[in-house]
Amino acid sequence: MSFSEQWNWVLLAYGFTYLTLVVFAASIAVRISHARHSLGDEG
Amino acid sequence: MNTRSPATTTWPWIVMAVAGLVTFVASMTVSPDAVQGELSRIMYVHVPSAWLAYLAFFVTMGASAMYLWKRDLRWDRRAAASAEIGVVFTGMAIGLGMIWAKPTWGVWWTWDARLTLTAIMFFVYLGYLALRRTSEDLHVRARRASILGVLAVVQVPLVHFSVVWWRTLHQPPTLLRPEGPDMDTSMVITLLVAVIAFTALYAAMMVKRIELARLEDSVLIAEQTAIRRVAGEAVTRPSIERGTA
Protein backbone atom coordinates (compact mmCIF):
# COMPACT_ATOMS: atom_id res chain seq x y z
CA MET A 1 0.00 0.00 0.00
CA SER A 2 1.38 3.39 -1.00
CA PHE A 3 2.25 6.17 1.43
CA SER A 4 -0.67 8.34 0.24
CA GLU A 5 -3.15 5.43 0.49
CA GLN A 6 -2.09 4.83 4.09
CA TRP A 7 -2.63 8.51 4.89
CA ASN A 8 -6.12 8.36 3.34
CA TRP A 9 -7.07 5.68 5.88
CA VAL A 10 -5.49 7.66 8.73
CA LEU A 11 -7.38 10.81 7.72
CA LEU A 12 -10.62 8.83 7.49
CA ALA A 13 -10.04 7.48 11.02
CA TYR A 14 -9.24 10.88 12.51
CA GLY A 15 -12.09 12.55 10.62
CA PHE A 16 -14.49 9.95 12.01
CA THR A 17 -13.08 10.38 15.54
CA TYR A 18 -13.23 14.15 15.69
CA LEU A 19 -16.56 14.42 13.90
CA THR A 20 -18.09 11.96 16.41
CA LEU A 21 -16.63 13.84 19.39
CA VAL A 22 -17.74 17.25 18.12
CA VAL A 23 -21.27 16.02 17.31
CA PHE A 24 -21.61 14.36 20.73
CA ALA A 25 -20.31 17.43 22.60
CA ALA A 26 -22.64 19.66 20.55
CA SER A 27 -25.58 17.37 21.35
CA ILE A 28 -24.87 17.79 25.08
CA ALA A 29 -24.67 21.58 24.67
CA VAL A 30 -27.91 21.74 22.70
CA ARG A 31 -29.78 19.51 25.18
CA ILE A 32 -28.51 21.62 28.11
CA SER A 33 -29.70 24.76 26.35
CA HIS A 34 -33.09 23.19 25.59
CA ALA A 35 -33.55 22.01 29.19
CA ARG A 36 -32.63 25.45 30.55
CA HIS A 37 -35.11 27.01 28.16
CA SER A 38 -37.83 24.59 29.36
CA LEU A 39 -37.14 25.62 32.93
CA GLY A 40 -37.42 29.29 32.02
CA ASP A 41 -33.77 30.00 32.69
CA GLU A 42 -32.28 31.79 29.72
CA GLY A 43 -29.08 32.77 31.58
CA MET B 1 -34.92 28.74 39.04
CA ASN B 2 -31.16 29.10 38.80
CA THR B 3 -29.89 25.95 37.14
CA ARG B 4 -26.45 27.19 36.14
CA SER B 5 -23.50 26.37 38.30
CA PRO B 6 -20.63 28.80 37.61
CA ALA B 7 -18.09 26.08 38.40
CA THR B 8 -19.40 23.82 35.64
CA THR B 9 -20.04 26.28 32.84
CA THR B 10 -17.14 26.72 30.47
CA TRP B 11 -14.02 24.86 31.56
CA PRO B 12 -15.15 21.37 30.44
CA TRP B 13 -15.44 22.61 26.84
CA ILE B 14 -11.90 23.99 27.04
CA VAL B 15 -10.59 20.70 28.48
CA MET B 16 -12.30 18.77 25.64
CA ALA B 17 -10.71 21.01 22.99
CA VAL B 18 -7.24 20.81 24.57
CA ALA B 19 -7.48 17.01 25.00
CA GLY B 20 -8.45 16.62 21.35
CA LEU B 21 -5.63 18.88 20.22
CA VAL B 22 -2.99 17.12 22.38
CA THR B 23 -4.03 13.71 21.03
CA PHE B 24 -3.90 14.95 17.44
CA VAL B 25 -0.48 16.62 17.74
CA ALA B 26 1.07 13.66 19.63
CA SER B 27 -0.24 11.03 17.22
CA MET B 28 0.69 12.96 14.07
CA THR B 29 4.26 13.71 15.13
CA VAL B 30 5.34 10.24 16.37
CA SER B 31 7.35 8.05 13.98
CA PRO B 32 5.33 5.46 12.03
CA ASP B 33 5.51 1.74 12.85
CA ALA B 34 8.11 -0.28 10.94
CA VAL B 35 5.56 -2.89 9.79
CA GLN B 36 2.22 -1.04 9.54
CA GLY B 37 3.63 2.31 8.49
CA GLU B 38 1.32 5.32 8.77
CA LEU B 39 -1.67 3.08 9.53
CA SER B 40 -0.30 2.60 13.06
CA ARG B 41 -1.46 6.17 13.84
CA ILE B 42 -5.03 4.85 14.02
CA MET B 43 -3.98 3.03 17.20
CA TYR B 44 -3.66 6.35 19.09
CA VAL B 45 -7.41 6.95 18.85
CA HIS B 46 -8.64 3.34 18.64
CA VAL B 47 -7.00 2.10 21.87
CA PRO B 48 -7.96 5.17 24.02
CA SER B 49 -11.57 4.85 22.75
CA ALA B 50 -11.69 1.22 23.89
CA TRP B 51 -10.05 2.12 27.22
CA LEU B 52 -12.63 4.85 27.82
CA ALA B 53 -15.47 2.46 27.06
CA TYR B 54 -14.13 0.12 29.77
CA LEU B 55 -13.69 3.01 32.22
CA ALA B 56 -17.14 4.44 31.49
CA PHE B 57 -18.90 1.12 32.04
CA PHE B 58 -17.00 0.49 35.30
CA VAL B 59 -18.08 3.97 36.48
CA THR B 60 -21.67 3.11 35.48
CA MET B 61 -21.42 -0.10 37.52
CA GLY B 62 -20.01 1.72 40.58
CA ALA B 63 -22.57 4.54 40.42
CA SER B 64 -25.42 2.06 39.89
CA ALA B 65 -24.31 0.06 42.94
CA MET B 66 -24.16 3.29 44.95
CA TYR B 67 -27.70 4.17 43.86
CA LEU B 68 -29.01 0.74 44.92
CA TRP B 69 -27.32 1.22 48.30
CA LYS B 70 -28.09 4.92 48.99
CA ARG B 71 -31.23 5.46 46.81
CA ASP B 72 -29.79 8.86 45.91
CA LEU B 73 -30.67 10.01 42.37
CA ARG B 74 -27.36 11.80 41.99
CA TRP B 75 -25.69 8.38 41.66
CA ASP B 76 -28.23 7.35 39.02
CA ARG B 77 -27.47 10.48 37.01
CA ARG B 78 -23.73 9.71 37.17
CA ALA B 79 -24.40 6.14 35.99
CA ALA B 80 -26.56 7.34 33.09
CA ALA B 81 -24.03 10.00 32.04
CA SER B 82 -21.18 7.52 32.05
CA ALA B 83 -23.19 4.88 30.14
CA GLU B 84 -24.06 7.32 27.36
CA ILE B 85 -20.43 8.41 27.00
CA GLY B 86 -19.37 4.75 27.12
CA VAL B 87 -21.74 3.91 24.26
CA VAL B 88 -20.26 6.73 22.15
CA PHE B 89 -16.69 5.54 22.81
CA THR B 90 -17.61 1.89 22.17
CA GLY B 91 -19.11 2.96 18.84
CA MET B 92 -15.94 4.90 18.08
CA ALA B 93 -13.72 1.91 19.01
CA ILE B 94 -15.76 -0.33 16.69
CA GLY B 95 -15.79 2.21 13.84
CA LEU B 96 -12.06 2.92 14.13
CA GLY B 97 -11.36 -0.82 14.34
CA MET B 98 -13.25 -1.30 11.07
CA ILE B 99 -11.33 1.52 9.39
CA TRP B 100 -8.06 -0.05 10.59
CA ALA B 101 -9.16 -3.58 9.65
CA LYS B 102 -9.95 -2.89 6.01
CA PRO B 103 -6.40 -1.95 4.89
CA THR B 104 -4.65 -4.45 7.23
CA TRP B 105 -6.95 -7.53 7.27
CA GLY B 106 -8.66 -6.86 3.93
CA VAL B 107 -12.17 -6.85 5.45
CA TRP B 108 -14.24 -4.26 7.33
CA TRP B 109 -15.64 -6.84 9.75
CA THR B 110 -15.12 -10.45 10.80
CA TRP B 111 -16.95 -12.49 13.44
CA ASP B 112 -13.88 -12.64 15.64
CA ALA B 113 -14.42 -13.05 19.41
CA ARG B 114 -13.15 -9.54 20.30
CA LEU B 115 -15.23 -7.81 17.61
CA THR B 116 -18.38 -9.83 18.28
CA LEU B 117 -18.25 -9.36 22.06
CA THR B 118 -17.60 -5.62 21.64
CA ALA B 119 -20.63 -5.35 19.34
CA ILE B 120 -22.77 -7.23 21.88
CA MET B 121 -21.53 -4.90 24.65
CA PHE B 122 -22.43 -1.89 22.50
CA PHE B 123 -26.00 -3.13 21.99
CA VAL B 124 -26.46 -4.12 25.66
CA TYR B 125 -25.55 -0.58 26.76
CA LEU B 126 -27.81 0.86 24.06
CA GLY B 127 -30.47 -1.29 25.75
CA TYR B 128 -29.50 0.28 29.08
CA LEU B 129 -30.18 3.74 27.59
CA ALA B 130 -33.48 2.51 26.13
CA LEU B 131 -34.47 0.99 29.49
CA ARG B 132 -34.10 4.43 31.06
CA ARG B 133 -36.95 5.64 28.84
CA THR B 134 -39.45 3.02 30.03
CA SER B 135 -40.58 4.93 33.13
CA GLU B 136 -41.03 8.58 34.06
CA ASP B 137 -40.88 7.75 37.76
CA LEU B 138 -37.32 8.74 38.60
CA HIS B 139 -36.78 6.06 41.25
CA VAL B 140 -38.41 3.26 39.23
CA ARG B 141 -36.23 4.23 36.27
CA ALA B 142 -33.14 4.42 38.45
CA ARG B 143 -33.77 1.02 40.11
CA ARG B 144 -34.28 -0.80 36.78
CA ALA B 145 -31.27 0.87 35.14
CA SER B 146 -29.02 0.30 38.17
CA ILE B 147 -29.66 -3.44 38.18
CA LEU B 148 -28.69 -3.64 34.50
CA GLY B 149 -25.78 -1.26 35.07
CA VAL B 150 -24.31 -3.59 37.70
CA LEU B 151 -24.91 -6.81 35.72
CA ALA B 152 -23.79 -5.56 32.28
CA VAL B 153 -20.24 -4.78 33.41
CA VAL B 154 -19.32 -8.50 33.26
CA GLN B 155 -18.91 -7.93 29.53
CA VAL B 156 -15.90 -5.67 30.02
CA PRO B 157 -13.46 -8.41 31.19
CA LEU B 158 -14.98 -10.75 28.60
CA VAL B 159 -14.17 -8.25 25.83
CA HIS B 160 -10.71 -7.46 27.20
CA PHE B 161 -9.55 -11.06 27.73
CA SER B 162 -11.28 -12.45 24.62
CA VAL B 163 -8.00 -12.11 22.68
CA VAL B 164 -6.25 -14.24 25.33
CA TRP B 165 -8.97 -16.85 25.93
CA TRP B 166 -9.80 -17.52 22.25
CA ARG B 167 -7.85 -17.71 18.99
CA THR B 168 -8.72 -14.40 17.34
CA LEU B 169 -7.73 -12.38 14.31
CA HIS B 170 -7.48 -9.37 16.58
CA GLN B 171 -4.00 -9.06 18.03
CA PRO B 172 -3.39 -9.83 21.75
CA PRO B 173 -2.59 -6.92 24.14
CA THR B 174 0.65 -5.13 23.25
CA LEU B 175 0.71 -2.66 26.15
CA LEU B 176 -0.84 -4.39 29.17
CA ARG B 177 0.98 -7.72 29.17
CA PRO B 178 3.15 -9.45 31.81
CA GLU B 179 6.38 -9.20 29.76
CA GLY B 180 5.97 -5.44 29.27
CA PRO B 181 4.90 -3.41 26.21
CA ASP B 182 5.75 -4.91 22.81
CA MET B 183 6.27 -1.51 21.17
CA ASP B 184 8.90 1.14 20.66
CA THR B 185 9.23 3.54 23.62
CA SER B 186 8.15 6.57 21.55
CA MET B 187 4.96 4.74 20.54
CA VAL B 188 4.26 3.70 24.16
CA ILE B 189 4.70 7.31 25.36
CA THR B 190 2.44 8.65 22.58
CA LEU B 191 -0.20 6.05 23.38
CA LEU B 192 -0.04 6.96 27.09
CA VAL B 193 -0.39 10.66 26.24
CA ALA B 194 -3.46 9.86 24.11
CA VAL B 195 -4.96 7.69 26.87
CA ILE B 196 -4.45 10.46 29.47
CA ALA B 197 -5.90 13.09 27.10
CA PHE B 198 -8.95 10.91 26.36
CA THR B 199 -9.43 10.30 30.10
CA ALA B 200 -9.46 14.09 30.64
CA LEU B 201 -11.94 14.32 27.76
CA TYR B 202 -14.14 11.74 29.49
CA ALA B 203 -13.99 13.65 32.80
CA ALA B 204 -14.97 16.91 31.08
CA MET B 205 -17.81 15.22 29.20
CA MET B 206 -19.01 13.68 32.47
CA VAL B 207 -19.26 17.11 34.10
CA LYS B 208 -21.44 18.47 31.29
CA ARG B 209 -23.46 15.25 30.86
CA ILE B 210 -24.25 15.11 34.60
CA GLU B 211 -25.30 18.78 34.43
CA LEU B 212 -27.61 17.81 31.55
CA ALA B 213 -29.05 14.85 33.50
CA ARG B 214 -29.80 17.12 36.47
CA LEU B 215 -31.56 19.64 34.22
CA GLU B 216 -33.57 16.92 32.44
CA ASP B 217 -34.74 15.54 35.80
CA SER B 218 -35.78 19.07 36.83
CA VAL B 219 -37.77 19.44 33.59
CA LEU B 220 -39.47 16.07 34.19
CA ILE B 221 -40.38 17.01 37.77
CA ALA B 222 -41.70 20.42 36.63
CA GLU B 223 -43.86 18.76 33.95
CA GLN B 224 -45.23 16.17 36.39
CA THR B 225 -46.03 18.89 38.95
CA ALA B 226 -47.88 20.91 36.26
CA ILE B 227 -49.91 17.84 35.21
CA ARG B 228 -50.88 17.08 38.83
CA ARG B 229 -51.96 20.70 39.33
CA VAL B 230 -54.22 20.62 36.24
CA ALA B 231 -55.62 17.19 37.22
CA GLY B 232 -56.25 18.47 40.74
CA GLU B 233 -58.27 21.43 39.44
CA ALA B 234 -60.36 19.11 37.26
CA VAL B 235 -61.19 16.92 40.25
CA THR B 236 -61.90 19.66 42.77
CA ARG B 237 -63.89 22.11 40.60
CA PRO B 238 -67.18 20.06 40.41
CA SER B 239 -67.30 19.72 44.20
CA ILE B 240 -66.91 23.49 44.60
CA GLU B 241 -69.72 24.00 42.09
CA ARG B 242 -71.94 21.55 44.00
CA GLY B 243 -71.19 23.35 47.24
CA THR B 244 -72.20 26.71 45.85
CA ALA B 245 -75.31 25.47 44.02
Image (tube, rainbow, N blue to C red):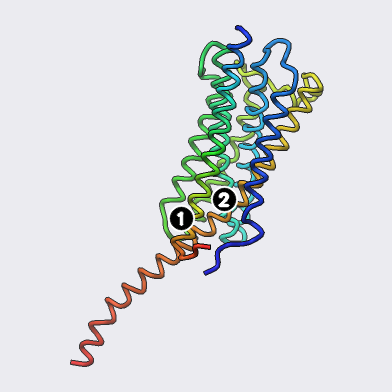
Residue B178 is situated, as x and y percent measured from the top left of the image, at 79, 25
| Image point (57%, 18%), residue name | A9
Q: Which quadrant of the figure has residue B16?
A: top right
Query: Is residue B220 positioned above or below B12 on the image?
Result: below
**The C terminus of chain B is located in which quarter?**
bottom left
Q: Secondary structure at mark 2?
A: helix
**Identity, as a three-letter code, of the amino acid under mark 1:** His
* Mark seen at residue B209: 2
| Image point (61%, 7%), residue name | A2
Q: Which residue is mark 1?
A: A34
**Identity, as a three-letter code, of the amino acid under mark 2:** Arg
Query: Is residue B52 positioned above or below B184 on the image?
Result: below
Whether residue B41 sits left or right of residue B109 in the image: it is: right
**Total of numbered circles in the picture?**
2
**Farthest residue, direction top:** A1
Whether residue B226 sits left or right of residue A12 in the image: it is: left
Please report, as a chain letter, where disc 2 is located.
Answer: B
Whether residue B18 sits left or right of residue B150 in the image: it is: right
| Image point (66%, 32%), residue name | B48
- Given residues B25 and B218, the one toward you in this image is B25
| Image point (73%, 11%), residue name | B34
